[in-house]
Image: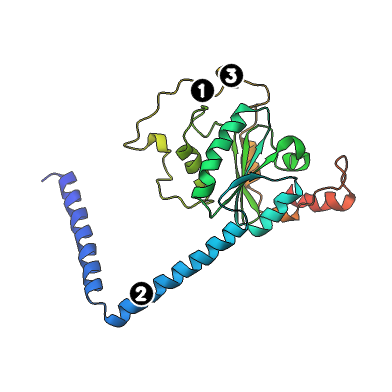
């Protein structure tokens, strides 16, 4: 028996031992134990249903547009996990993002999916350092935890799958994901890579307003922040901040 076969045998024996121990534990459960397990399960289901109703009351389960910048702060107060798409009407790639998020929103009701018109949100666009459209901002418990900038992390092509978008959002725990987080869906065993016809910068989607040059380390700097976004205060005048607002925003520098 070679070394590899011996290792496989040891692993198999260890697994069998664990299975036998689990079976023995189940067989030794008394009536009271089973009843307690049943009660615990019912309690868990009730808590989930309560949480589900709360999510739905806070507009989870759908993908919609916020009317103004200030509305995002109301969302942040109500939802722990938020996916915000900053878009532009003229961008074809933003429409691609819309298509995927519309599919993911009802699938992941634990997360709030929404979008904002970047041209109508100059304050947030500046504070989030949004230089590329589309940009997806990921917020968890009032903290900006990540940004998905353009399509470079989605296969670098415009016909990426919804599964790829789902996998990328799940990297920060914003959605409940049952797949393999370590490997993109199109690279996992059993998933045959698509024969893509064109990349992002090819053809009709090669527009000046999309995929502008951006420093990747800028994202790392953003991720180093840990201050709550609720510290931010949108100025009442779009052209200038008050001294008090400037002082408060220094927390985010």
Residue 228 seen in this snapshot: no
Identity of the residue drawn at 21% across and 71% down: 24
Residue 204's tag is: 3
Which is in the foreground here, disc 2 or disc 1? 2
Q: Nearer the viewer, residue 46 or 33?
A: 46
Write down the quadrant of residue 209 in the picture.
Answer: top right
Considering every residue shown, the one lying at the far bottom of the view is 32
Q: Are marks 1 and 3 in contact (CB under 8 Å)?
A: no
Q: Is residue 247 left or right of residue 20?
A: right
Between the C-alphas of marks 1 and 3, the distance is 11 Å
- Secondary structure category for the residue under label 3: helix
- Secondary structure category for the residue under label 1: loop
Q: Residues within 10 Å of mark 2 (few under 14, many from 20)?
A: few
Q: Which residue is mark 2?
A: 37
Residue 190 seen in this snapshot: yes
Task: Say if 172 sits above or below 163 in the image.
Answer: below
Q: Is residue 27 left or right of residue 143?
A: left
Identity of the residue drawn at 68% across and 58% down: 77
Which comes sooner in the sequence, label 2 or label 3?
2
Q: Which residue is mark 1?
A: 199
Considering every residue shown, the one lying at the far top of the view is 203
Between the C-alphas of marks 2 and 1, the distance is 52 Å
């Amino acid at each position: 028996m070679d070394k590899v076969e011996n290792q496989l045998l040891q692993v198999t024996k260890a697994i069998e031992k664990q299975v036998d121990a689990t079976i023995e534990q189940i067989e030794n459960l008394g009536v009271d134990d089973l009843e307690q397990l049943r009660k615990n399960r019912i309690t868990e289901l009730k808590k989930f249903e309560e949480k589900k109703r709360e999510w739905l009351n806070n507009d989870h389960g759908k993908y919609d547009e916020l009317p103004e910048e200030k509305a995002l702060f109301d969302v942040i107060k109500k939802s722990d996990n938020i996916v915000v798409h900053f878009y532009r009407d003229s961008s074809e790639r933003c429409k691609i993002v819309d298509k995927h998020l519309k599919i993911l929103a009802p699938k992941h009701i634990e997360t709030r999916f929404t979008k904002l018109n970047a041209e109508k949100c100059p304050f947030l666009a500046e504070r989030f350092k949004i230089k590329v459209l589309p940009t997806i901002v990921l917020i968890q418990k009032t903290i900006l935890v990540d940004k998905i900038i353009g399509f470079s992390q989605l296969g670098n092509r415009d016909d990426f799958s919804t599964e790829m978008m789902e996998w990328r959002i799940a990297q920060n725990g914003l959605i409940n994901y049952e797949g393999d987080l370590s490997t993109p869906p199109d690279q996992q065993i059993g998933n045959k890579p698509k024969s893509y016809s064109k990349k992002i910068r090819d053809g009709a989607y090669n527009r000046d307003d999309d995929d502008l040059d951006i420093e990747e380390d800028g994202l790392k700097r953003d991720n180093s922040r840990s201050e709550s976004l609720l510290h931010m205060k949108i100025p009442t005048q779009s052209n200038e901040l008050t001294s008090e607002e400037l002082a408060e925003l220094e927390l985010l520098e």
